[in-house]
Amino acid sequence: MSRVVGIDYGTKRVGVALSDESRMIASPYRVIEAAAAIEMIEQIVAGEDIELVVVGLPIGLAGNETSSTIGAREFAEELSERLAVTVELADERFTSKVAEDVLIEAGMTRERRRQIRDKMAATVMLQSYLDSLR
């Protein structure tokens, strides 16, 4: 099987996670500045055995769409137009909170958490997506 890329889209930073070839385990990959995200994701897809990109969709707690939801949809649409692989959306409610809680429990400083929170949120979202496939 080929790998899956998980994307935690943000207006400043974009977190990226990758699955293993068996699509069982998601791992943090990197954090990308939003301005360069499309090009960097194109490079990741070209350089790895990627078949699917999953973009986290930040739906509001009441199930409503927010400005972040609209931004993630537009980002996924642009990726879909530029990549030769499938791009899907997946619910990412609470992924940033879960990632933050794990990093706090690991004793990381606020600055270190800020540096890796986005790729950890992408990992949480991608792992949830992979788990839903089984």
Image (tube, rainbow, N blue to C red):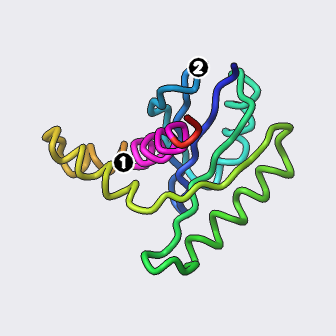
- The quarter of the image holding the C terminus is top right
How many marks the image carries: the answer is 2
Residue at 49% over, 57% down: 92
Residue 15 forms part of the magenta stretch = no
Q: Secondary structure at mark 2?
A: loop
Q: Position of residue 31 (x, y in %)?
A: 49, 42
Front residue of 14 and 4 = 4
The local crowd at label 1, few if under 14, some if 14 to 19, many if 20 or more residues have their Cα within 10 Å, is many
Q: Is residue 16 above or below residue 93?
A: above
Residue at 71% over, 28% down: 50
> Which residues are the magenta region?
118-131
The amino acid marked with disc number 2 is Ser
| Residue holding disc 1 | 117
Instruction: Name the mark on residue 97.
Output: none
- The quarter of the image holding the N terminus is top right
Dividing the picture into quadrants, the one containing residue 71 is bottom right
Residue at 75% over, 31% down: 51
Q: Position of residue 128 (x, y in %)?
A: 47, 44
Residue at 45% over, 33% down: 28
| Closer mark to the observer between disc 2 and disc 1 | 2
Structural distance between the alpha carbons of marks 2 and 1:
25 Å
| Residue holding disc 2 | 22
Instruction: Answer with left or right where residue 106 lies relative to residue 75.
Output: left
Q: Position of residue 130 (x, y in %)?
A: 54, 37
The amino acid marked with disc number 1 is Arg
